[in-house]
Amino acid sequence: MNDVLAAGPALTGIGHDVLVGIFLLFVGFGAIPVLAGLAQFLIIPLHALRNHYRETGPYLPNVAVLVPAWNEAAVLTASVERLMSLDYPPDRRRVYVVDDASTDDTPAVMARLGDRFPGRVVHLRREKGGEGKAHTLNHGLREVLADDWMEALLIMDADVIYAADSLRKMTRHLADPTVGAVTAYIREGSEDAHGVTRFIGFDYLAAQAASRRAQNVAGAMACLAGGAQLHTRENLEAIGGQIDTSSLAEDTVTTFRTQLAGRRVVFEPHARVLAEEPAGIDALWKQRLRWARGNVQITSMYRHLWFRKSVHPGLGGFFFGVFWFAILLLPLAMLLTSVGLIGLYLLDSDLAASVFGAAVFVPVATFVFMITMTISVDPRVGLKVWKEALLFPGAISFTVLVGATFPTLVPWGAGDASGWTLFVYSWLVLCVPMAFLVRKVELTRWGRRLAPIGLYLVGFGPMMCAITVDAYVKEFRGAAMTWDKTEKTGRVMA
Amino acid sequence: MSRGRTTSDRSTSAIEKSLAARPYRVSPPVVLTAAQLAAFGGVLPVWADPLALADETEADRLRERRLFAGLASAIAVVVLLWTVRALLM
């Protein structure tokens, strides 16, 4: 008994050390998404050397353009007119608008367009609609595949506007028989001076123009953009001639199926497409929740694939797996980092301060590196959204990061700053419920004025994390897979 | 631990090999009538001229070299940040 009592302090010391080790591991886990992001952005410049341009050819196939539409009368005329004026042989493109039982003026708009472009604009109407985009696309696919004329199929959204040279810049990659599909660079198309769309502008710049170049280099594409995916006929037939209807991320399933069927998917950064994106937080939430739930479903659907190069050298590779899970598990990483830092603070505040002080420059430097790199891939958009880029993690997090990077500059560093320190350590996880709150605020009477302020304070990044958490909860509860369509108003102008 | 290659994996690999052995896809040449050419203001559109298409692709390929400038600026900004921090600390 006395031996046990005597060993008490030593055991307490071991327990303390074990806890410190665990909390350090938690903080280390939080570094994984940062390092994954850095690795991805470091390989982007390699796209100058490792790209698909040398394997392209002057290939101008017969292209059927498939446009799913549900109550898109406001945007259809501009969209079809733009397609008709593309710099592409006129007799080698046809537009098929698949009207998902619209209740607006879509049939009348399409009748007028059909008269203006006889034989080149086709109206396909579903009498029973509302089943989602994938079912609408499948209706059109059956019609288009039944006709031998089509050699390539462009799937797009009704609101997107293609740059005049974009289609031929995409088709050139299809000359290579190993390529099954090509996607383009989608830009946020409104000219809004601030708010949600500016954040989306930066988000698209980072996630598409920058990240997809890295995926080109790595040889595995995560997702064909829903509004700009060009397939060869052979590829569509190889993947079953149908779009997946079992998940909310049919674009990603199509991308995975294409690559698993032995064909390459290429991103063409110089084929530019403008798209209208949600201008409000609630609309953005619904759109991104659908994407996030789709990604959760795909993670489970392709569980045999992750980190198994034998299944697919690109999709099953280490790089792609880390990249995929770094995004999917970001909320967990943020939670563990916060718990780790608070735990270290309670056990040994000096050690916590040392860890935080030593580690903080890595995410700050990575953040600055990624922003500069992202802006440089498309300076025209980048210089327009640089403020939103800096405030992507939120004004509060930005202040915290500046304070941690330059502690001598901040007034709150002096004296007893334990309250501030605890706030800094816990904000990483607190910002997620705050993002939920910002969404709720938007739905209140003063929401239109207050919500944008809340978004800038909390940040677009934490909001995406909150949406991922919401996606997990909805999947766990088995919530209905509803297709919350983003309302389009025709704000985008070429 | 790898689960090894499966039947479907082998077929994927076989498809990749057979696709790589295929000739490049070609489309029939675009022929413009005099009336069509007049509609384009007498200037041959890029899509009707294989050489112009090849030039366009080459220009896009060379444009990708700007990524190196982006990398240099990104590194410069990080070094600047580090230097300012070191001076202030």
Image (cartoon, coloured by chain):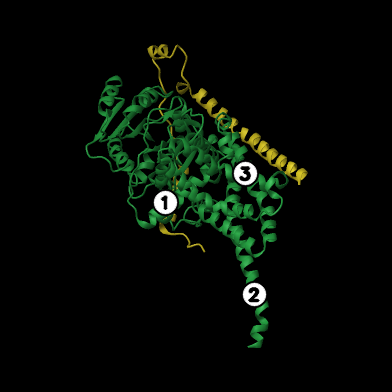
Chain colours: A green, B yellow
Depth check, front residue: A224 or A237: A224
For mark 3, what is the residue?
A399
Circles 1, 2 touching at the beta carbon (< 8 Å): no
Extreme bottom residue here?
A1
Instruction: Give the labeled residue for mark 1.
Output: A471
Rendered location of residue A210, percent (x, y): 55, 39
Q: Earlier in the sequence, mark 2 or mark 3?
A: 2
User: Residue under mark 1: which chain is it in?
Assistant: A
> In the picture shown, does residue B22 fall above or below A294?
above
Kindly indicate the quadrant of the structure image that contains residue A122. top left
Label 2 to label 3: alpha-carbon separation = 38 Å
The residue under label 2 is A12
Crowd rating for badge 1 (residues with CA inside 10 Å; few <14, some 14–19, many 20+): many
Q: Nearer the viewer, residue A463 or A95?
A: A463
Give the x, y percent position of residue A404.
67, 48
- Is there one chain holding both mark 1 and mark 3? yes
User: Element type at marker 3?
Assistant: helix
> Residue flagged by tag 1: what amino acid is it?
Ala
Q: Position of residue A323 (x, y in %)?
A: 53, 50
Of label 1 and label 3, which has the lower sequence position?
3
Is label 2 in a helix, a strand or a loop? Answer: helix
* Camera-side mark, 1 or 3: 3
- Classify mark 3: residues with Cα within 10 Å, few (<14), some (14-19) or many (20+): some
Give A99 or A182, whichever is nearer the viewer: A99
Q: Circle 1 — which element? A: helix
Badge 1 vs badge 3, beta-carbon distance below 8 Å: no
Three-letter code for the amino acid on which mark 2 is drawn: Thr
What distance separates the C-alpha of mark 1 from that of mark 2?
Answer: 41 Å
